[in-house]
Amino acid sequence: MSCPQTEQWLTSYLGDELDHEARSQFEQHMTLCDDCRRELSTMSSAHSALRSWREEPLPEWGWSRMQSVYALQGASSATKPATRPRASVTWWQWLPTAASFAMLILLLVDTRVIVNDEGVTVAFGGQAALLEREETQQLLARFEQRQDENSIALMQAALTQARESSESTFQQLFTYFEQQRQRDMQDVRASYEQLVNSDYETVRSLQQLANFVTFNESGL
Amino acid sequence: MGINNDEDTVLVAAAVAGSSEAWESLVRRYESRIYNQALRLTGNAADAMDLVQEVFVGVFRNLHRFRGESKFSSWVFRIVHNKSIDMARRWRPLREGNRFEEQNELEALPATSESEPDRRFAQAELNHSVQAMLAMLPIEQRIVVEMKIFQMLTFEEIAEIQGISDNTAKTRFYAALNKLKNYSENFNVLSTD
């Protein structure tokens, strides 16, 4: 496409925005310009294809729900003609806001709920804090005492167990040493007897050797 | 499209004043037209129904803001335009391109007691082809085509509704047709079979 007027002409023509005079000029241009004629041919077919749309009937789409919403709004606005229609806001939609507000109030007035042996007490402000602090101190003291007692008992049990364990260990060690000593004494005794026997054999061999030498000398 | 603007103005005033009958009349006058717009803009019946509902909720909530300075139909289409762009942006992260889907033609047909199923089926096929063509366009061009070809608005009106210049509206229209011209050749072959 090289005609500089193609886009302008075709946009206006296919957009159906040419008046009588402009349409005449356009038709005249089409007789002279191959580029525009060719482009018009292809674009017209796209245009026609799009215009082949036929209206489709609407399925059921939940109109009744919207109608009820409108009726809710309309009932309140009917008496006030200037009232603008607004989205429906039901009471439960305010619940989270109300709950947050209530919690904020409770926090601001320092509300405390105390549960003890005497029951449940709801208190507001600093007095409750004082009472609660004293009770907390007492509880802490009791807890500390109980912890000390438990620690002492645990330590005593550990010491007793350690002592008994040490006695048993020493007893076993002493028994082992005694057995070892007995075994060593037996070994020493056996070695001594073996040594004595060995010496006796040696003396006897020497005696025989002396006798043999003596015999030989006398024979000569 | 056979909608009288004076009647619209009267109905809107009555609806704002609290008349549920007037509101129902407005809905009945526009629901089919908006549904068909939605079918072309979204490409499938389920999303079109969602768009119809969103549009009417938007109309309902903003009805008091309608001052009658423009045609009610143009004002409604501005809401259709905004909602369809919102919907297209919501889809974009999920699926690159568009949500125009192959759908079962028989399921897409509305349940009516008409006695010409073949004709209706052929027409549904043609409509589906139009949807497929529109699906090739970016949402901005699709909306201009919708406004120009189906709503028959002027480029000046389109520019005003979309908040763009006349030239931008014209450029989008031309670019859309330029893109569709090759596809329409195949379309013509199919439609003459």
Image: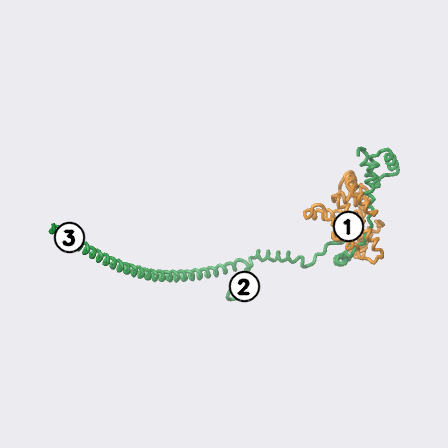
Chain colours: A green, B orange
Q: Label 3 belongs to which residue?
A: A212
- The answer to whether marks 3 and 2 sit on the same chain is yes
Q: Nearer the viewer, mark 3 or mark 1?
A: 3
Q: Position of residue B23 (x, y in %)?
A: 79, 55
Instruction: Tell me the chain of label 3.
Output: A
Q: Which mark is residue B39?
A: 1
- The answer to whether marks 3 and 1 sit on the same chain is no
Q: Position of residue A78 (x, y in %)?
A: 77, 57
Q: Position of residue A55 (x, y in %)?
A: 82, 51
Q: Nearer the viewer, residue B61 or B101?
A: B101
- Cβ atoms under marks 1 and 2 closer than 8 Å: no
Q: Nearer the viewer, residue B51 or B77?
A: B51
The amino acid type found where label 1 is placed reads Leu
Q: Quadrant of residue A190?
A: bottom left
The amino acid type found where label 3 is placed reads Phe
Q: Nearer the viewer, mark 3 or mark 2?
A: 3
Q: Label 2 belongs to which residue?
A: A121
How many marks are shown on the rendered structure? 3
Horizontally, residue B53 falls left or right of residue A184, namely right
Q: Secondary structure at mark 2?
A: strand
Q: Position of residue A211 (x, y in %)?
A: 14, 53
Instruction: Tell me the chain of label 1.
Output: B
